[in-house]
Image (tube, coloured by chain):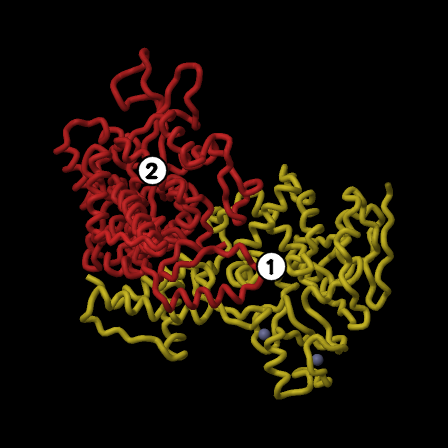
Amino acid sequence: MASTGDVRRLFLQSLLSRGIVSEALCKTLYAKCVEAVKAANDDLNIASADTDEAFDEVIKQLNVSLNDLDLEIKSTQDELNGKRSFALVNTKDDELAQMATDYTPAEIVFFKAIVDQIMLARNEAFSLSSMAALREVSNIKPKSNMTKTQAETVLASFVAKGWLLRSKRGRYSLSTRTLLELYPYLKSTYGDELLYCTICHEVVTKGMGCHRPNCQVRLHFHCFNLYRRRNSACPTCKIEWPRQATDDPLTAVGEAAVRDGDDGKRRVKARRTNGDEDEDEEMEADSSQPSQPSQPARSQRNKRGSKKKAVADSDEEEDEEEEDEEVPTQEDSPPPRRRSSRR
Amino acid sequence: MARAAARSQRSSRPSQSQSQPRPSQSQRRIDDSDDEDMQDDDDGDEMVEGAGEEESSSTAELRRKANALVRYALFCEHKRMPLRREEFQKKAMGSNSRSFGRVFEMAQLTLKQTFGMEMVELQSKAALEKERTGVDEEQLEESRKATATKKKATTAGSKQYILRSTLDSTIIEYASQTIAEILDQELEDRDEEDENETLPQCYGSILSWSTADQLEPVGILYVILALILVSGRVISDTELRAHLKRLHLSSNVDINFDVKSTIPNNTQSLDNFLESLRRQGYIDQQIIGDAKKAKGPGKGKRVRSTQADNDSGIKYEWRWGVRAQSEIGEQGIAQFVAEFMVTREHEEDEDEEEGGSSRNRRRQDPQKKVEKMLDGIAKAAGGELAGLK
Ligand SMILES: [Zn+2]
Ligand SMILES: [Zn+2]
């Protein structure tokens, strides 16, 4: 016999069968779960959740029942359109969860390498050119026998399954699904790189930043618009802001922040060996020169004036064997010179 | 990556889409009321459990492990791999593997209470074999009943489990139907996803199976299962390939997967496809007993990897695998075939009418047609169609 509790059971099954769903769809689904259970047992008196408060309460209660399982129904706003989505996600980054993904271990290593380069991208660009993404195949350790062609297929799969976004410019960035479902992993691995929106407190990988050099304010586009309607100055440093998030002199978070030459270099975050060290060491991965003084990962703020169009991918990739000899870009220095191919 | 159990609803495909078996058959219902008398799917190892353990701390420990098992079950289901008891024990039970029975019970209860799902043990190949060759139908029926209600015969245990819904069949049926409001919302959301031409189809049902990270061209699997079924539950390799060839599927034709897969070029040869279905346990291949090894029909040697009949004179045959028996069921496939045929006929009728045909043929009630078709399929299979095992 159907019971009231079947509504939440069916709702969870529905979420499990779908992955990420829009807020509107999520609410429709819940309403239909109520109807499904009523169809099975007419006598049940089930409250619908047609107000925002009631729906929030439903989610809250479900999360109580999921807590011990390290699962949670989480929601986040799409960084590009501000639309809220829900997903039932794993809140623990453990071994069992790892092995249960539908990618092979080599593909997961590749995915992690891509995420790594996205997270460590210079100037808060949080994106990676497609050629640089393919190049990651050869940097995978232990060596993988994945070919570049196969890597392309795998990348397309990451995009098709919603783990990565691919922009018009062909740059890969983190998707809403990844930000939702892989947050525990991102947080534990890139705690220092993650930027949070001053308004909604969720992770920002696409948005704007305050242009005052040491001001930490970063906002999603939708959060900026919301805030800017009523305020004209930065919430923290009070400097005046222009009307649009993309206007000068505001800085960019995301692919608009890519500068000439940024894609030519890989960044490697030195994993901390002792916990006390809190400065990231950064190295040029393939550097054949004596290493340059290291540069803190995020201290470098991109000035609007030096924002340049992204380097065309093809420029970078003529020669895959090419060693990277760039000196890390210093703040305010002109874009690095183009390397010359050694062939 | 935590999209758990996307496939857990395989018992509940939308009945609207003609390409899926109907849910009602494949759904075994368990009432909330029997939460207390959990099945004992374990063969009793928990009896030997150490008596001297500290009660409270060990209970908390068991609870933690049970929760880990629930998570593992959901993840396995998402990956559409059966949960292997041995693997879980190795990963999570540590030295204390003897208490698995209790952990399993606790996990089963959580699955049922929180998710309306349960772990169901797949039949072992040995048990299936016995069933198929055994002549004693009565004994068979009895063991089938026993399987459904309480303890599984020790021989039947494969120590592999899949998840199945325990919700009322009316709910499942409702949840598998297309609902206009859901479909509208799905389409609206999809429209906003600009330029992404690779989005999965949507069907507007509460339980979606199309947006799951599904890779296999599931339609071809159903066709293969149907072919085996209507050939009397076993089909020779030659015959199967002849049928598939008529459907333009021959060994040198690539089967298309969608871009979500990581298979090179998103295509796979028929042989590789059959092999992966075999590995997942949907279909099973054996050598037809030749003169030297023959010990009777159906007792051919199992093969390690998919082979086509070849010049060496070795012949192969195909049967349903354990996963197909537990996950899809003969009735499910029969329903799929019947509905597909009837709907198509129906559509053809309509086309004719649109085409100006003045024939005023009285149309048979589609439901009756489906039933008739089901009878026919059962006859072709050589006996009453089995539900889920
Ligand atoms: Zn925000
Ligand atoms: Zn500021």
Kindly state the secondary structure of the residue where label 2 is placed. helix
Q: Nearer the viewer, residue B37 or B143?
A: B143
Residue B278 vertical position relative to residue B209 in the rendered view, above or below: above
Residue under the image location 67 percent in, 66 percent down: A254
Which chain's residue wears label 1?
A
The label on residue B225 is: 2
User: Which chain is assigned red?
Assistant: B
Cβ atoms at labels 2 and 1 below 8 Å apart: no
Q: Nearer the viewer, residue B124 or B377?
A: B377
Residue B371 coordinates in the image, percent (x, y): 20, 47
User: Which chain is assigned yellow?
Assistant: A
Which chain's residue wears label 2?
B
Q: Nearer the viewer, residue B285 or A143?
A: B285
Quarter assignment of residue B316 = top left
Kindly state the secondary structure of the residue where label 1 is placed. strand
Amino acid type for the residue under numbered disc 2: Leu
Residue under the image location 65 percent in, 71 percent down: A207
Amino acid type for the residue under numbered disc 1: Leu
Residue A249 vertical position relative to residue A309 in the rendered view, above or below: below
Relative to B54, A253 lies left or right: right
Mark 1 closeness class: few <14, some 14–19, many ≥20 residues within 10 Å: many
